[in-house]
Image: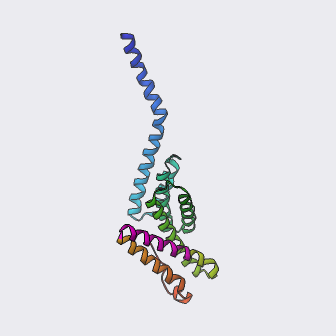
Amino acid sequence: MRMALLVCWLIIPVAAGAYHFGPGQQRILLDDAQALIEQAQHDAANEQWAAAETKYQRALELLPSDRVRDQRRVRIERAKAQMMVKKLPVAHQDMKALVEEMQEDEDADPALLNESRQVLANSQYYITWLMRLEGKSKSEWEPEIESARQTFRLLAYEAEKSGDQATAERNQKDLESSIRLARMDLSELQGLPLPSQ
């Protein structure tokens, strides 16, 4: 009886060590990533966009590859922060890739897909504004604003269909803004302040 108790007593630290160095390591990474995400959200709420972007990036590096939904959520939030720290082209490319990836994934969360589409459409709107100010030709900037327009229309339709009137109205206003941007004369555009989030 004593021998059985002694063996059990000796197995406990071995089992604890096996958990700590095995599945426990993933839990530690997840806890660290969650802490960084919470700090980044706090920074974003206080409009400290550069700090938020850095923390979202570090959280992404810690998240395991099987946490796809969490990675996508963090990529969206990082892109929002990047757009605020003058990294619009980087955010734009990442959102393009994310939307394509999610459209091909049958298990993708529809709400997350819509949010990624919203961020992509916003980036396309701002990219178009900048391209027009830089004097790019219509053939260069028109595909961006047309894609944004179609996305805003889709998002407004889906929000209205689901009964989310506030989101539908916001997307309808964004749709109207994208149409105005496409039709606006360059001299009018140059007289306006740069748009902000």
- Relative to 181, residue 100 above or below: above
Residue in the image at 43% along x and 28% along y: 16
Magenta segment, which residues?
A: 145-164
Q: How many marks?
A: 0
* Protein image colouring: rainbow
Indicate the position of residue 68 as horizontal and vertical percent values: 50, 51
- Relative to 70, residue 180 above or below: below
Residue nearest the observer in this picture, 74 or 190 = 74
Residue nearest the observer in this picture, 147 or 8 = 147
Q: Which of the 4 image quarters holds residue 187?
A: bottom right
Residue in the image at 51% along x and 52% along y: 60
Residue in the image at 44% along x and 40% along y: 27
Indicate the position of residue 58 as horizontal and vertical percent values: 50, 52
Residue in the image at 49% along x and 66% along y: 117
Extreme residue toward the front, this view: 161
Indicate the position of residue 161 as horizontal and vertical percent values: 39, 69
Residue 136, can we see it? no
- Relative to 108, residue 156 above or below: below
Position of the C terminus, as image quadrant, is: bottom left
Would you say residue 170 sits in the magenta stretch? no
Position of the N terminus, as image quadrant, is: top left
Would you say residue 162 sits in the magenta stretch? yes
Q: Which of the 4 image quarters holds residue 91?
A: bottom right
Indicate the position of residue 167 as horizontal and vertical percent values: 38, 70
Q: Main secondary structure of the magenta part?
A: helix
- Relative to 50, residue 122 above or below: below
Residue 159, can we see it? yes
Residue nearest the observer in this picture, 109 or 46 = 109
